[in-house]
Image: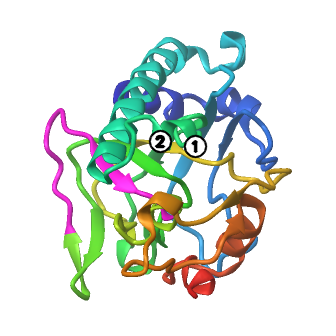
């Protein structure tokens, strides 16, 4: 899968520009910096983004150089995600299908990131500081490294392990579980070596652009009690995503929902 993403990004610009768009409602798009016109700084990264579920894109709409592997890989990630949501449900003391029945595994988007070698890495980041605005993220990364998580007031490297996947809890899962599961702030540092390749698959309420999703999300009732009252008020996906994209990097999007 990493090789397929690299093949796409290292094609001639004339080939890639067929997929270039800043319309985040598209199901297949190639661009740099989703928040280019909102963020105070740009990051050192290009991205191929594909919306894979709940409705698979037409195969002809996908880039030829990674079409087959993207479809096959996304199918396996979808299956893995369902299993993980079942295990998390059991771990929370819920019915195994609880999170799946809440459609946590319903929507999957695929982001193939390409971080070129950076001549002045101290002046930028590969990915700015953020937590994920989804239920769960499954990340595949190459051996170059650069991913860091914020833990105990310091940045900690996440060294690559061959064949391993990284699973991140997203903000929406922290909200649903009333802080029993926590999302984590992370970033990718730029490097003079490159390129770095990664594939992040997001189980989310919807894709990047806030749309018509008016479903409310709040702490799961079965996890609440007098001893464990709700930490957050309910929010719609629309309202949450609008806040997420407007707040800037480095602060939690859940803070404004605290009770």
Q: Residue at x 27, y 49 (%)?
A: 91
Q: Residue 81 sits in which quadrant?
A: top left
Quadrant the N terminus occupies: top left
**For residue 13, above or below residue 120:** above
Which is the main secondary structure of the residues drawn in magenta? Answer: loop
Q: Nearer the viewer, residue 103 or 40?
A: 103
The reply to whether dot 1 and dot 2 touch (C-beta < 8 Å) is yes
The location of residue 89, given as percent across then percent down, is 36, 45
Asked if one can make out residue 160 in the rendered structure from this viewpoint, the answer is: yes
Q: What's the mark number on residue 198?
A: none
Q: What is the quadrant of residue 56 in the picture?
A: top right
Residue 32 placement, left or right of 75:
right
Category of crowding for the residue at label 2, using alpha-carbon neighbours closer than 10 angstroms: few (below 14), some (14–19), many (at least 20): some
- Residue range highlighted in magenta: 157-171
Image check: 191 left or right of 54?
Answer: left
Q: How is the image coloured?
A: rainbow
Give the mark count: 2
Residue 259 in the image: state x and y as whole percent.
Answer: 58, 88
What whole-number distance in Å separates the C-alpha atoms at marks 1 and 2?
Answer: 6 Å
Badge 1: few (under 14), some or many (20 or more) residues near its Cα, within 10 Å?
few
Question: Which residue is at the front of the view, 96 or 27?
Answer: 96
Marker disc for residue 102: 1
- Residue 173 sits above or below residue 246 on the image: above
Q: Which label is found at residue 98?
A: 2
Q: Indicate yes or no whether the magenta region holds residue 161.
A: yes
Q: Nearer the viewer, residue 98 or 237?
A: 98
């Amino acid at each position: 899968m990493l090789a397929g993403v690299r093949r796409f990004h290292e094609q001639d610009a004339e080939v890639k520009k067929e997929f270039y768009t800043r319309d985040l409602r598209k199901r297949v798009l190639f661009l740099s910096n989703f928040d280019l016109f909102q963020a105070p700084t740009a990051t050192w990264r290009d991205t191929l983004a594909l919306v894979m579920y709940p409705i698979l894109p037409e195969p002809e709409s996908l880039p030829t150089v990674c079409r087959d592997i993207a479809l096959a890989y996304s199918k396996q990630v979808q299956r893995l995600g369902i299993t993980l949501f079942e295990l998390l449900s059991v771990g929370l003391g819920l019915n195994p299908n609880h999170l799946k029945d809440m459609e946590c595994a319903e929507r999957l988007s695929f982001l193939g990131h390409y971080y070129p070698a950076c001549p002045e890495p101290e002046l930028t980041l590969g990915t700015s500081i953020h937590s994920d605005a989804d239920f769960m993220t499954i990340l595949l990364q190459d051996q170059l490294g650069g991913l860091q998580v914020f833990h105990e007031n310091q940045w900690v490297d996440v060294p690559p392990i061959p064949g391993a996947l990284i699973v991140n809890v997203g903000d929406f899962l922290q909200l649903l579980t009333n802080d029993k599961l926590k999302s984590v702030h992370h970033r990718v540092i730029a490097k003079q070596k490159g390129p770095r390749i990664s594939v992040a698959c997001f189980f989310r309420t919807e894709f990047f652009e806030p749309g018509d999703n008016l479903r409310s999300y709040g702490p799961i009732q079965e996890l609440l009690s007098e001893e464990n009252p709700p930490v957050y008020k309910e929010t719609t996906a629309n309202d949450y995503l609008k806040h997420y994209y407007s707040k800037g990097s480095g602060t939690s999007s859940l803070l404004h929902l605290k009770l």
